[in-house]
Amino acid sequence: MNTQKLRNWILIGDLAWVAISVGLTYALCYGLRWNDHVTQVLFSFVPTLIGVLVLWTITFSVMKLDGFWRGWNLAAIISQLFLSVCFLVVFLLACSYINLNFISGLPLAFFGFLLLAGLVGVRCIAHARLGSMYLRGAAKRVVIVGSGPVAREIEIKIESHPEMLCRVVGFLCSADTSVEGGPGNSRGAAVIQTLGVIDLFRQHQVEEVIIALSEFPEVMTLTARCRQEGIGVSVVPQPYELYLSRPQLIDIGGLPLLRLHEANGDFSNALWKRAMDVVGSVILGIFAAPAIAFAVLLLLRKKEGPFVRELRCGHFGKHFYMYRLNSDRDCKSLSANEMFLQKLSITELPQLWNVLRGDMSLVGPRPESPERAKHYSDWQRQRLNVKPGITGLAQVHGLRQQHSSEEKARFDLQYMLHPSAFMDVALLLQTIWTLFVRLFGSGTRDFTDTNSLQGTLTSAHSAQSSAD
C-alpha cells in the first residue's frame, strides 16, 4: 500500500469526523429539534468549523499524526491525539470568546471526547484494514541479507510499520554467522550454495531482498541476479551507526549522495525545555508528595534511611548525585510493598528534586553510572549531549536499568533527532500508560510478528559462497 495514500485517507477520515462531531455534540446538548434558531447558530459557526478543519490539517501534517510515521504504538497515538484535541478545544474556546458567542464547558467536553474517540477509531480501522490485508497474503515477502544488530533492527522496524505491507520471512548470511538476537539462529539452518539462493527465493515466493551489510562475499552477484529475476533490492547504508541520523538523499548527476544530519543536544538548554521542567516538576511534585510520604513510611526500617543517592553521568558526562528511594533493584527477595514501589517507579520520584536543581530533565535519556558510561562507544556517547531524564523514549518502550546501553541508545538518539515540547508532553503521558501495563500485564504481539514463520524458512538463514 502507498503510505502517502494511506495518510491522505486517514486525514480525510479525520476531517469528516470533525464535522460529524460538531453535529453529534449539538444533538447531545441541545436535542434534535430543528428551527430557524438552530440554522442561524450553525451558519454562524461555519467560519469557526472551517478554521478547525484547516488547523487540524496543518497539525496533522506538521506533527505526523497519521499513527504510523513513528511506528504503530497505540499508547503513543492516544497521547499525541489527546494533546492535539486539547489544542483544538482551546482554539474553539478562543474563537467563541472573540466572537462574543461563548461556548459552555459541557459542549466543549462532549466535542473533545467525541473527537478523540473518533480520531483513535479512524486509526484503529486503518490498522485493522492492514491486518486483514496481511491475513489475505497481500504483504510483500522479504528476506534480510545480513546478521547482527542491523538485521534485527530492520526486522523490528518492519514489524512496527504495518503500513509497509512487508513480512520478514527469513535471513540470509554467511555460513559462519547467525542472526544476533533474532527469532531464528543457526540451529536448523541449512548451508546452501550461492547459486541456489535464487531457487530458494522462488520456492518461498520472496519479492524483496534487504541488504543490511557491506562485506557479504557475493553481494554484488546476489544483487544482480535478484534484479534479473524481478526481485526488489533495498540497501541499508553502512556503517550501522548511520541509520540513526537524519539522512538527505542528494542526486549529483546520477551519483547518490547521502548527507547526514547528526543528533545534537542544543535543545537541552532551550528556554521551553527548562520552563517545562520547572513547572512540570513542581506540579508533579505536589501530586507525588503523598506517594513519596507513603513510601518513606514503608522504608523507614532500613538502617541506611529511606533515601539514597547514586553517582550518575549527566550532561556532557558531568557527574552528579541522583536521588531515589532506598529499594535495591537487584535484590531477589523484595517484599511485596517494595515490588509495588518499583513497578510503579515510585522509587524514582525523588528525582524531581534533580530536575529542579537542573541536573536532570523530565524527559531524556536515563542517566547511567560512570562505570557503565566508561565503556560507551563513540556512538553511544552521543546520548550524553543532552540532559538525562526521569523518563524517555526507551522507557516507554519497556527498557529499564537491566537492558543494555546499546538498546537504550537507539531510542535515545531517535528522541534527540526530533525534539519538541509536543513530544515531551506526549512521552510523559505514555509513561503513565507504560506504568499501568507494567503493573497489570504485558503488551500483546502484533499481526506483523514474524517469529512464528521462522520454522518454515530456516534454510534462508545462511548461505555459502559459490567459490567453495
Image (tube, grey):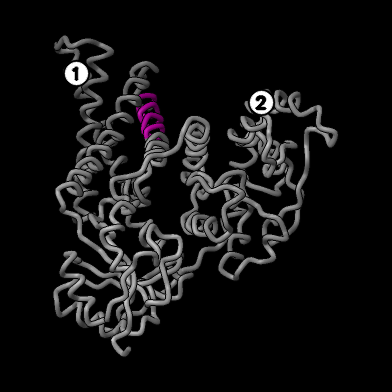
The residue tagged 1 is 40
Q: Which residues are magenta?
A: 85-97
Q: Main secondary structure of the magenta part?
A: helix
> Number of marks in the image?
2
Q: Is residue 40 magenta?
A: no
Residue at image location 27% in from the left, 81% down from the top:
193
As drawn, the residue found furthest toward the front would be 188
Measure how far apart labels 1 and 2 are at the Cα level: 52 Å
The residue tagged 2 is 291
Residue at image location 41% in from the left, 32% down from the top:
86
Residue at image location 33% in from the left, 18% down from the top:
107
N-terminal of the pair, mark 1 or mark 2, is 1
Q: Quadrant of the N terminus?
A: bottom left
Of residues 148 and 468, the one drawn nearer to the viewer in this rendering: 468
Q: Quadrant of the C terminus?
A: bottom left
Residue 252 appears in the rendering? no
Callouts 1 and 2 close, C-beta under 8 Å: no
Q: Is residue 87 magenta?
A: yes
209, above or below 334, in the image: below
Q: State the image coordinates of residue 9 (x, y, percent, origin top left).
A: 19, 45
Of residues 119 and 273, the one drawn nearer to the viewer in this rendering: 119
The amino acid beneath tag 2 is Ala
